[in-house]
Image (tube, helix red, strand yellow):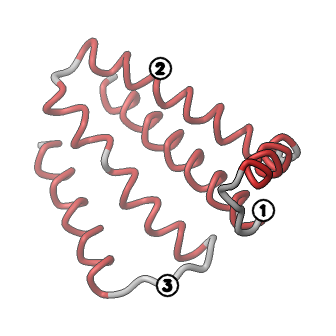
Amino acid sequence: MRWVLVAVVVCATVFADLLQSHEMKRAGEQSVSARGFARLLHTIARRRLLFLGVACNAVAFFVFMALVQTEPLSFAVPASSASYVLETLLAKFVLHEQLGARRTAGALAVLAGVLLIGG
């Protein structure tokens, strides 16, 4: 059951971050002034996928709470960091971001850590 909870946390986190990044990139650069903040709120209110991303964040949060009720935090946090690896891959292939050697090596190091704690 613990791996099911980890999988749900990871997937929900990945979808949330991917949707939020996609929608905010579509919105373009925003100003931090009072007028810019109001415009940002208006932009956010019109983005359905952004709200779906927020809902995914809520799912990830509550499932993570269920995970730490049954598993040690020293397992739950590293295992859920598998989302970093999946997000890095999806950022490259879905959002068409550039990955350098250092970023790829970092993602592989996180993956190695997840595999180590999983055993």
| Residue 111 percent across, percent down from the top left | 25, 60
SS of the residue under disc 3 = loop
Mark 1 or 3, nearer chain start: 1
Q: Residues within 10 Å of mark 1 (few under 14, many from 20)?
A: few
Callout 1 amino acid: Ala
- Quadrant showing the C terminus: top left
Q: Is residue 84 left or right of residue 102?
A: right
Q: Is residue 3 above or below residue 79?
A: above
Whether 96 is drawn above or below 71: the answer is below
Q: Pointers 1 and 3 in contact (CB under 8 A)?
A: no
Residue at the spot of label 1? 27
What percent of the width, then of the height, locates residue 76? 24, 32
Measuring 43% from the left and 42% from the top, which residue is drawn there?
Answer: 10
Find residue 98 and name its label: 3
The residues tagged by marks 1 and 2 sit, at their Cα atoms, a distance apart of: 28 Å
The quadrant where residue 51 appears: top right
